[in-house]
Image (spheres, helix red, strand yellow):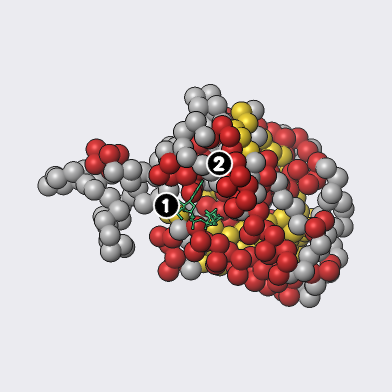
Amino acid sequence: MLRSRIAGVGMYLPENVVTNNDLLKYMETSDEWIQERTGIKERRYAHRTKETTTTMAVEAAKVAIGRAGITPQDIDFIIFATLSPDYYFPGCGVLLQRAMKMKQIGALDVRNQCSGFVYALSVGDQFIRSGTYKNILVVGSEKHSLGLDFSTRGRNVTVIFGDGAGAVVLQPTNSSDGSSQEQGILSCHLHSDGNSAEILAQYNPGSHANHWTEEKVADFDDAEIGEMFLSHAMIDNAQLFPNMDGPAVFKIAVEKFPEVILEALAANDLQTSDLKLVIPHQANLRISQFVQKKLRLRDDQVYNNIQRVGNTTAASIPIALCEAWERDIIKEGDLICLAAFGSGFTWASALLRW
Ligand SMILES: CC(C)(COP(=O)(O)OP(=O)(O)OC[C@H]1O[C@@H](n2cnc3c(N)ncnc32)[C@H](O)[C@@H]1OP(=O)(O)O)[C@@H](O)C(=O)NCCC(=O)NCCS
């Protein structure tokens, strides 16, 4: 039975550290408020002009590919998760393929925000299990700093997010009986509920035409045809920034994270006590602590780095995974659960034996 395993993991964080106090230059907030509500002390911002979502992904991918003992030319499929792509289209996958001089392989972009990496991993897992590909690059990368609202108006969202990239290489492992004691991804579990789509969303630019919301979320120029992508009014009325109902996100997140972790364990006949490490999407330290308490996990069973990195959306799980591996916290044979929740809402988990 073919199963996929993570053969190499890499990450990239931009050099520029932005502390909570640094944000005081732009908005009314405080280090105390941010730390108390989110756990975040600092985050990284990419260089404004020299770094992009794709260039950061390339750096993370180089490390992951090197650690897998292969070269970029050996990669036979790219899956790229991001909500902050270099271009509206084409996606970042092809930009990475070009930048890394890869063969003319398939490149797929995934738009599942905070659960983007786990969704991407699940797609890669299926391609490996089916025997289609042997070396798949799965990346999550974000340059949030490109378009956050740095005025006081946007502070509830802006203080949370940071930039960075993480990547893994998936390869087949030949398991003999498919038991949960063998190495590799044991199972992935994906969910969505579009009823909450507008709770955490950036509406514009988009084709929605104010169709889904009672209130207008975009002001368009008067025109007989077209002119709906971007208007001066959209800029003047701050309609090009992300929107979030923080308390509503919190409430559902603390329900769905434990649910999807338990679902993964149950599917493999395993218990929380079998887990070496849960790597939750780094949404908010308070959310992770709530989940830990609910599942009665020890401190050493949950990995958190949001204090130093912020919420890096699709990049957060591979960055945390890479850090945990580099710090020797993850060893061969360990049971790891990756779990994510975010905009959509979408939520997902992947259970793997390292
Ligand atoms: C965003 C979040 C930290 C806000 O905390 P909260 O306690 O729920 O705060 P609220 O949004 O109710 O706002 C409380 C007050 O703090 C203020 N506030 C919001 N952001 C602030 C900031 N950065 N600094 C200072 N004050 C801030 C609000 O304006 C509000 O003031 P008011 O009471 O005078 O109106 C919290 O809701 C949260 O973490 N939610 C989950 C978000 C998340 O994880 N998102 C990522 C999902 S992948």
Labels 2 and 1 touching (C-beta < 8 A) = no
Q: State the residue in front, 118 or 199.
A: 199
Residue 282 in the image: state x and y as whole percent. Answer: 64, 51
Residue 76: image location, x then y, percent: 64, 44
Q: Residue furthest top?
A: 50
- For the N terminus, give its image quadrant: bottom right
The residue sitting at 68% across, 72% down in the picture is 263
Placement of 70 over or under 82, stated as above or below: above
- Pointer 2: what residue? 30
Sequence-first tag of 2 and 1: 2
Left or right of residue 295, residue 195 in this image: left
Identity of the residue drawn at 55% across and 62% down: 250
Place of residue 7 in the rendered image (x, y in percent of width and height, measured from the top left):
77, 47
In the figure, 53 relative to 37: above or below?
Answer: above
Question: Which numbered disc, 2 or 1, marks the residue closer to the eye?
Answer: 2
Front-most of residues 137 and 310: 310
| Residue 147 visible in the displayed image | no
State left or right for residue 5 relative to residue 256: right
**Could you say where residue 184 lies in the image, as x and y percent from the top left?**
78, 58
Measure the alpha-carbon separation of dots 2 and 1: 21 Å
Q: Quadrant of residue 126?
A: bottom right
Q: Disc 2 on helix, strand or loop?
A: loop
Local secondary structure at mark 1: strand
3 on left or right of 239: right
Mark 2 beta carbon near ligand 1 (under 8 Å)? yes
Q: Quadrant of residue 188?
A: bottom right
276 or 118: nearer the viewer? 276
Residue, x 51% and y 66% (percent of image)?
192
Q: Amino acid at mark 1?
A: Asn
Circle 1 residue:
243
Q: Amino acid at mark 2?
A: Ser
Which residue does the image show at 24% across and 38% down from the upper left? Answer: 232
